[in-house]
Image (cartoon, rainbow, N blue to C red):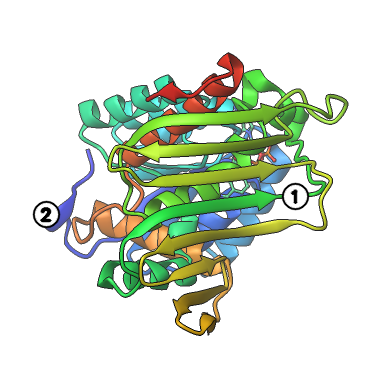
Amino acid sequence: MSQTGATRGREPVRVGVIGAGWPGERHAEGYVANPDARLVAIADANPERAAAFAARFGYLQNGQTLKVYSDYTELLADPEIEAVSVALPNFLHRPATIAALEAGKHVLCEKPPALNHAEAREMAEAAARANRLLAFALQRRFSPAVEALHELVSSGELGEIYHARGVWTRTWGVPKGIGGWFTDPARAGGGALIDIGVHVLDMAWFLMGCPAPATVSGQVYNKFPEETKTDDSAFALIRFADGRGLQVEASWVLAQDEDHYGVYIFGTKGGARVDDNRIDLYTVGEEGRTTRTRVIRAGWQQAFLGQAANFIAAIRGEAQLRTPAAHGVQLMAMIDGIYRSSAEGHEVAM
Ligand SMILES: NC(=O)c1ccc[n+]([C@@H]2O[C@H](COP(=O)([O-])OP(=O)(O)OC[C@H]3O[C@@H](n4cnc5c(N)ncnc54)[C@H](O)[C@@H]3O)[C@@H](O)[C@H]2O)c1
């Protein structure tokens, strides 16, 4: 059983990554860059991917050889490992996370938290039962631009943030994943909304202070069934219990001018648009709109480093999780609500 908090001293947290794809590599970069973490193992069902991952990240750790597992349950049985990243396809988030928690590991699970709200709740309950940390990879909360805007909002400079809009609309960009799981509702849980809408919904919700959702009105479409069996676009309005609102727009296929990505927040003293690299601030004055621009020069990679650092610091008892299980459960409730509202054709209560 791993030590947590003050009892563990300065020993680095020993971590395993499950899933050697693009997100698994980003998690590994976060651990390798962190002196309080040590990456010790990789598990992937594809031996070539696992070997390539081990060669790359073993080398980064001064020639150390990573342990390589093809079956993630074997990695979970390794007593040296205290924490894992789950970077598997969506349908494996729940089983792998619950198995990891029951094996006594802390878990950082990729987005979306799960296929649906019920699964996310089960995962959070498993973490509470096991007395282990469960975080979700909502890494854009750690992007320096989002962090800076969050601080600005908290300082009150923009007044009351009464509305927000999260937009990630691709004109054309349907992911497939190994075996085509991204476009299969049973294995992905949904399409553009659950895949990329979840990021901008979360950024906007985080900047608003994570208010409690009250009702949701959603409209999702599958107009390009030859490309995907899931939603290729989704649009929704979420009303919060405190009277504020949030719109989300997401697409993999949409006839529009160009791709759009960004989160807009509207406050009584000012508004802002943020993406991974910059913040644009707006105020409305007597002479009309004035715009100030603040550019934060840091790439999206920084977000993955911050996410890993927060997870490790939380395990060490030195920080609160910024992306805790409870937030993942709420996000999945909102996403379920959007799909349900669209299927039923009316606004639904949360
Ligand atoms: N946070 C982000 O910005 C971000 C970006 C991309 C993907 N993701 C998320 O990461 C997850 C994985 O996405 P992906 O694009 O890497 O998918 P993928 O299908 O490309 O790859 C997943 C990896 O998991 C491995 N794998 C599959 N089944 C396995 C099993 N049973 N046991 C062990 N290994 C197994 C595959 O061999 C592959 O290496 C998804 O949930 C996706 O939503 C997050």
The local secondary structure at tag 2 comes to helix
Q: Are marks 2 and 1 in contact (CB under 8 Å)?
A: no
Quick check: can you spot residue 77?
A: no
Q: Where in the image, quadrant-wise, is ligand 1 located? A: top right
Quarter of image, res 108: top left
Q: Is residue 44 left or right of residue 223?
A: left
Label 1: element kind: loop
Inspect the image, locate mark 1, and give the three-letter code of the amino acid beneath it.
Arg
Q: Read off the residue under disc 2.
A: 7
Q: Where does residue 17 sit, x and y in percent of width and height?
A: 50, 45
Please, is residue 11 above or below residue 74 in the view? Answer: below
Q: Which mark is residue 155?
A: none
Q: Is residue 133 left or right of residue 291?
A: left
What is the x, y in percent for residue 226? Answer: 88, 26
Amino acid of disc 2? Thr
Query: Depth check: 314 or 13 in front?
Result: 314
At 52% from the left and 52% from the top, the residue drawn is: 165
Establish if 314 lies above or below 108.
Answer: below
Residue shown at the point (11%, 54%) measured from the top left: 7
Residue occupying the far front of the picture: 286
Q: Which residue is mark 1?
A: 170
